[in-house]
Amino acid sequence: MQTAKVLASTATHKIESWQKRSPFIILILASIVGAATGLLGSLFHICINYTVSYREQFLQHVEHASPYLSYFLIFCITAAMGAFAYYLVQRFAPETGGSGIPEVEGALLNLRPVRWWRVIPVKFFGGLGALGSGMVLGREGPTVQIGANLGKMTADLCKVKNNESLHTLIATGAGAGITAAFNAPLSGILFVIEEMRPEFTYTKASIKAVFVGCITSCMVYQFIMGSNPILDMGTFLAAPLKSVWIYIFLGLFLGLIGSLSNSLILTLRRILGLFYQKKQYFFPLTGAVLAGTFGVLSLLKPEMTGGGFAILPNLVDGMTMFYPLLILLCLRFIATILCFGSGAPGGIFAPTIALGAIIGVLFGMIAQPVFPQYDIELLNCAVLGMAGLFAATIRAPLTGIMVVMEMTGSFVLILPLIITCLAATFMAQTLGATPIYSAILNSTLASSKNEPDQSKEK
């Protein structure tokens, strides 16, 4: 009896000792998750750049021989990349289709499996194939899902059994993924706090873990990629206080466009979901057609392809005319809906930010002659459009503001940024538009009820 009491007392002491050390251990694990996410996020960035650069150099040599041959080759090469990406998603990890952020939110609710041994390689190489082909997608979706799965992998390898600690590491990886995509640690932290507020458990330890993970991810990213902002768009001038009311109308229009975009994406997902069910090869075939088409467009109209960051510095140089820019907006709007709505393993942040910048510049072109006394800058309008459309689509205004400020260094525009994003969010809510990730998660949960339980698969 005495021995049993001693053993019980020892076990209790060990549990209490673990509980005291647990927050510190979680912070150590969070730093590991952040560093791994920063490393893989940087590698993903480098591989995409290398793929696009190699493809362009190869076609420059072929184009001198025969333009038609170059079109044929680029279609075949990029179509193969798209088919490969979509096949990986379909065959090995269907949860990697799309941005993957709804899957992370579902995992935090214990409603979706986290099969990191499948998701990490499929999302990396599938995302590389889709983005490298020239499709209108962003790299933040893959980095967020990869980061979250690295959090689950770390928890599994370290045998973390506590559900709250597990969720903390998953959320830390997601925030670190945003950081690695945009070189924006504050944005990664705000993304977890704002976008994942219904799913994330807030404690002192969990918030500290997210901070540590995002900071570590940023340090690793900057060590590899450098510390410069993602976008160098020039020097920003503070908007005159008397002019900030104008940006309410910009925000309202962005809220309308964001609501329309979400509605069309969800509608296309439903239609294509029925289409994919008819024949198994329809999904990779769709990827081949889309990737091949955008591969050819990368030769003919390069501003139509990719995430859109490459075109942003040229939007405000005064050389772009109104109607060509309006046409570009319409074409990229359609392209964004097609690529993201098709289930490609890529994100929507970057295309949304590019669309918002175009809308902002168009708004500035209209407002400049109407209000000449306000000294409206097209550069400012572009940045406000970027944040406003992000806020309307994702329904995360604080994250949108911080992402844009960290990406561009436009901290002097904080007041008009807040006004624009609040107006955009207000309009989207008034129209009854569902946040894109919440709507996709609800659709996924509804469709998964009749599917086998993937979480039991080894």
Image: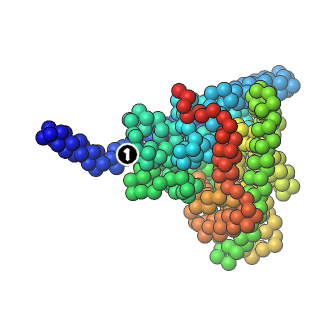
Asked whether the viewer can see residue 72, the reply is yes
> Which residue: 70% across, 75% down?
245
Query: Residue 58 is drawn in which quadrant?
Result: top right
Quadrant of res 133: top right
Task: Examine the rendered structure and indicate whether residue 365 appears above or below residue 342.
Answer: below
Give the amino acid at mark 1: Ile
One can see residue 292 in this view: no
Tell me residue 286's x, y (percent). 79, 32
Q: How many neighbours does mark 1 have within 10 angstroms: few (below 14), some (14-19), or many (20 or more)?
A: many
Depth check: give the residue in front, 298 or 176: 176
Q: Which of 219 and 396 is in front in this view?
A: 396
Quadrant of the rendering where the N terminus is positioned = top left
For image coordinates 52% across by 40% down, the residue present is: 147
Q: In percent of the image, x 52 and y 29: which residue is there?
A: 117
Question: In this view, which residue lies farthest toward the bottom?
Answer: 242
Q: How many marks?
A: 1
In the image, residue 126 sits, relative to residue 421, either above or below, namely above
Return the x and y of residue 410 as percentages of the image width and height: 59, 60
Q: Which of 102 and 57 is in front in this view?
A: 102
Give the farthest residue toward the left.
2
Tag 1 secondary structure: helix
x and y percentages locating residue 338 in the rendered image? 78, 42
Query: Seen from this angle, which residue lies furthest front?
Result: 1
Q: What colour scheme governs how the chains and residues are painted in the rendered image of this protein?
A: rainbow
Relative horizontal placement of residue 457, taking residue 427 as reference (left or right): left
Residue wearing tag 1: 26
Q: Which of 26 and 68 is in front in this view?
A: 26
Look at the picture and state if 71 lies above or below 300. Answer: above
Whole-percent x, y for residue 123 in the image: 60, 34
Residue at image location 80% in from the left, 37% down from the top = 274
On screen, residue 103 versus residue 304, left or right, reads left
